[in-house]
Image (cartoon, rainbow, N blue to C red):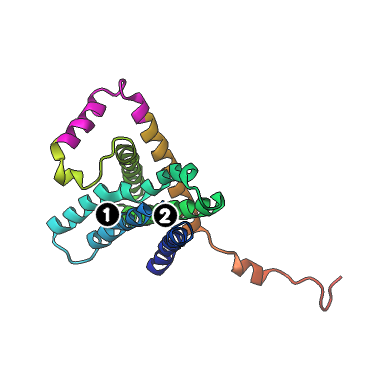
Amino acid sequence: MVVWLLGLTALPVMLVAGRVIYTDSLTHTHMVWNLLLAWLPLVFAYLALRPRQARPIRLAFCLAWLLFLPNAPYLVTDMIHLPYGGGIPILYDVVLLFSAALCGLALGLVPLRWMQVAVAGRLGAWPGRLFVLASLGMAGFGIYLGRYLRWSSWDVVLKPVALAHDIWLHVSHPIQHWQAWALALLFATLLTFAYGLLATLEETRYPAASLRSAPKRGGAGGT
């Protein structure tokens, strides 16, 4: 799994490098930093789920995972940079930005799956599903905060008062900020469907056994 994710990350990184060489410009180089940040949810989830770990440390890693979770699917919103490429075929940028978005979804949803399994193992299947929906809802709002209000996960430590003030304004005046909540819901819905696709693919098995047991056409006694 990790090797596959590393390969998936390497694709947009190589495409960015190729773009810099071809165009002699730094357009889209910020994607490399965004890809690095997208790995943080997976790292924190892995650390949180390590066995034989003190509860306060586990809780700290869980909170760090939730805090940095929006950094991964945030890469989907970098698709807005598509019209501003220039100097290279637009389909090149389509592949670059789409591969980065796909990487961000994978790096966000895979550790969420790990966390769901852990929660379901302790509390049951339905609490695990509710945990997923709540996490994706918060991730959707976090993506909005990052893309439109330009807050980052680091600001929880660097500018906690200002960040809390902005969040409180949206929570206390939802009607006034209805567009923000609509966008957050839109992001959360996209992530929910993407997560459903991941779960479906995980549960899908190729019916090799049924094919082996199927009768062969022709041969002795065939028609």
User: In the drawing, does residue 165 fall left or right of residue 189?
Assistant: left
Residue annotated with mark 1: 122
Instruction: Let me know if residue 167 is in the magenta part.
Output: yes
Of residues 134 and 7, the one nearer the viewer is 7
The kind of residue tagged 1 is: Arg
Rendered location of residue 72, percent (x, y): 35, 51
Nearest to the eye among marks 2 and 1: give it.
Answer: 2
User: In the drawing, does residue 221 fall left or right of residue 28?
Assistant: right
Q: Residues within 10 Å of mark 2 (few under 14, many from 20)?
A: few
Q: Is residue 154 above or below residue 55?
A: above
Q: Quadrant of residue 140?
A: top left
Name the outermost residue toward the front.
Answer: 24
Q: Identify the secondary structure beneath mark 1.
A: helix
Which residue is at a point 52% across and 59% down the rendered structure image? 204
Specify whether residue 34 is in view. yes
Q: Quadrant of residue 33?
A: bottom left
Instruction: Write down the region rendered in magenta.
Output: 162-181
Which residue is at a point 82% across and 73% down the rendered structure image? 218
